[in-house]
Image (tube, rainbow, N blue to C red):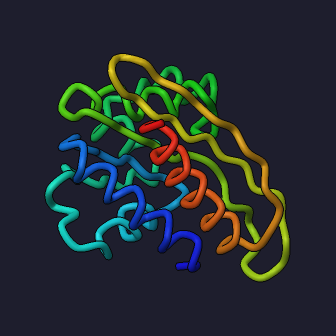
Amino acid sequence: MTKTIEILAVQVAKKFIESDKTLSIAESFTGGALTSALVQIPDTGKFLQEGIVTYTNESKIERLLVSKKDLEKHTAVSEEIAKQMVKHLSQKTDYAISTTGSAGDTNNQAAQGEYYIALAKEGKTIVIHRTPTGTRKEVIEDGVQSALQILLEAFS
């Protein structure tokens, strides 16, 4: 975890605790790294309801009620699927966020990544799309950092 991610996670946790709002997370390409960044912070249990890693299409369908038809039409790396990943979670929590994408197929060489992050709050959903270049680790860290920034900005 980078220092920037640590700082953002503390800021996000503080906002959630102060506002008495709840959060649920659905992760794919970040593989639990977003949830992990937040649970490093004391008192995360005051706002974090759940963190689900749905890495395969099958788990997205089963756990998050994502449409199989839409997965086939759009693929998991799409705005539509990012939105569907938060739809079910947002019915049980104040904020829901999802990460879906590809961190690239190479381990140590720079590659093109692509991801979508959806945030649902108060009946509205926003989605961002990014295509960072870097190693798998760097692309995943970029996704976690982006998700934390979106959460922080949601309180502005």
Provide residue 30's location: percent of width, then percent of height: 52, 60
Task: Decide: is 142 above or below 89.
Answer: below
Q: Image height check: is 59 above or below 71? A: below
Q: Residue reaching furthest top?
A: 123
The residue at 22%/40% (across/down) is 21
The foreground one among 128 and 28 is 128
Q: Position of residue 132 (x, y in %)?
A: 78, 56
* Pick the front one: 24 or 27: 24
When the figure is inspected, residue 143 is found, relative to residue 96, above or below; the finding is below
Question: On the image, which quarter does residue 22 sit in?
Answer: top left
Residue nearest the viewer, comparing 31 with 34: 34
x 69%, y 38%: residue = 129
Find residue 16 and report its horizontal and vertical position in percent: 28, 49
Q: Nearer the viewer, residue 64 or 41?
A: 41
x, y percent for residue 74: 63, 26
Q: Residue at x 62, y 22 (%)?
A: 73
Q: Name the residue located 45 percent from the left edge and 54 percent from the top edge.
A: 55
> Is residue 42 rendered to the left or right of residue 126?
left
- What count of labels does the image hold? 0
Q: Is residue 134 left or right of residue 115?
A: right
Q: Left or right of 97: which side holds 133? A: right
